[in-house]
């Protein structure tokens, strides 16, 4: 017959062993991880490779101890929702790229552990309660370090063009990045004596029309809102800005490499290791609600001097001294 002391001892040991058993079970489970990115395998191939490499460095290899389900969505909320609704019921964890994808993922599921990558302002967008304490099923990495980043891009244009008074803001309708960008820009624009004019584009065929409208309406420079559409069609946007002789500012350095004038932003590829860190912690038992959102700490200032020359612009020496990368 078991005495009271022996009974309590066994119960205590069982309770102590339970979390270890759960953790071991989670570690042995082959997690199905959905990775949903904006664009196509061609346009974001460098991002997929970076994520795979970072996961491998953390000990997670597709087909061995995790299963990766790659999906790509067109640069609009409807396309993202269609992809996510089909995928979410079949996976254990979701990695989603872009602000559009993050917002739609929150609409589709409030329970599936989700890691977002490259969103603008997850607190303002309602994805998390706070950066330090997300409080729900989502956490991840932001694209902007603060709401002031767009204002800083506007300041760069003003530094290059001191007489600048009218700036066109180009973005895709339905992209949740636009309200975040406009709030930042509207705080700074009055101090720079700049008027903002928003132009929303839905199709590549309409981009040319919008640039013509900008030029005829007195726009002197264009600031492009970061988003899946403007990233995927960055080269076309840069070409049109140059052909319409409009100095242009971006969040993505790739667009400057394609002919844009200047960019201030983080490198999306640099976010991949953090995605692997979050995935590792969640698989080992952590909850997204308890994992603080990370913000970029490194922002690159990139300028295309060939484009500046084609536009007849002289880059102020103090600005040129701050540039991290020059494209010639």
Image (tube, rainbow, N blue to C red):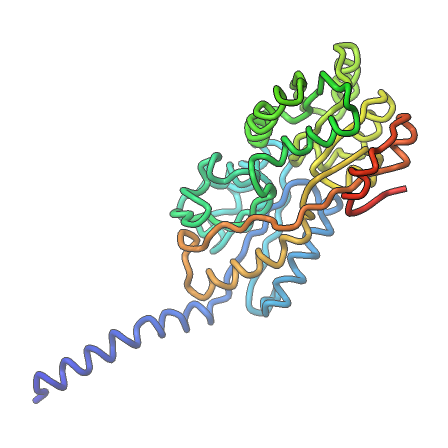
Residue furthest toward the front? 318
Q: Where is residue 38? Give x, y as percent.
A: 64, 41
Q: Is residue 189 left or right of residue 27?
A: right
Residue 217 placement: quadrant: top right
Q: Where is residue 19? Give x, y as percent.
A: 33, 71
Residue 219 placement: quadrant: top right
Q: Where is residue 268? Give x, y as percent.
A: 67, 48
Image quarter (top left, top right, bottom left or bottom right) of the C terminus: top right
Choose between 315 and 77: the one closer to the eye.
315
In the image, what residue occupies the spot 74% across and 37% down? 263
In the image, what residue occupies the spot 42% across and 47% down? 134
In the image, what residue occupies the spot 58% across and 43% down? 145
Image quarter (top left, top right, bottom left or bottom right) of the N terminus: bottom left
Q: Where is residue 27? Give x, y as percent.
A: 46, 70
What is the number of callouts on the image? 0
Choose between 171 and 264: the one closer to the eye.
264
In the image, what residue occupies the spot 78% across and 10% down? 216
Q: Is residue 280 left or right of residue 232?
A: left
Residue 197 versus residue 296 in the image, above or below: above
Residue 250 versus residue 23 in the image, above or below: above
Q: Is residue 309 left or right of residue 261?
A: right
Residue furthest toward the bottom? 1
């Amino acid at each position: 017959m078991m005495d009271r002391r022996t009974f309590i001892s066994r119960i205590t040991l069982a309770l102590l062993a339970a979390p270890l058993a759960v953790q071991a079970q989670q570690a042995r489970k082959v997690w199905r991880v959905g990775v949903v990115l904006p664009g196509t395998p061609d346009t974001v191939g460098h991002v997929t490779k970076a994520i795979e490499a970072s996961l491998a460095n953390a000990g997670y290899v597709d087909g061995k101890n995790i299963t990766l389900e790659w999906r790509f969505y067109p640069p609009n909320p409807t396309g993202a929702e269609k992809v996510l609704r089909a995928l979410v019921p079949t996976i254990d964890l979701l990695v989603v790229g872009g602000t559009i994808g993050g917002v739609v993922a929150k609409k589709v599921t409030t329970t599936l552990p989700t890691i977002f990558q490259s969103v603008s302002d997850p607190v303002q967008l309602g994805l998390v309660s706070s950066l330090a304490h997300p409080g729900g099923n989502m956490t991840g990495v932001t694209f902007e370090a603060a709401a002031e980043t767009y204002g800083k891009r506007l300041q760069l244009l003003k530094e290059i063009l001191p007489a600048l008074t009218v700036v066109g803001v180009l973005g895709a309708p339905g992209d949740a990045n636009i309200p975040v960008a406009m709030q930042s820009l509207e705080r700074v624009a009055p101090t720079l004596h700049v008027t903002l004019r928003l132009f929303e584009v839905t199709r590549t065929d309409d981009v040319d029309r919008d640039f013509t409208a900008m030029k005829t309406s007195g726009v002197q420079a264009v600031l492009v809102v970061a988003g899946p559409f403007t990233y995927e069609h960055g080269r076309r946007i840069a070409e049109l800005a140059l052909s319409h002789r409009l100095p242009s500012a971006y969040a993505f350095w790739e667009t400057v490499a394609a002919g844009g004038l200047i960019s201030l932003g983080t490198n999306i590829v640099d976010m991949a290791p953090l995605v692997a860190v979050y995935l590792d912690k969640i698989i080992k038992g952590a909850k997204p609600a308890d994992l603080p959102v990370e913000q970029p700490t490194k922002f690159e200032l990139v300028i295309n001097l060939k484009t500046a020359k084609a536009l007849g612009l002289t880059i102020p020496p103090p600005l040129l001294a701050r540039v991290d990368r020059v494209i010639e």
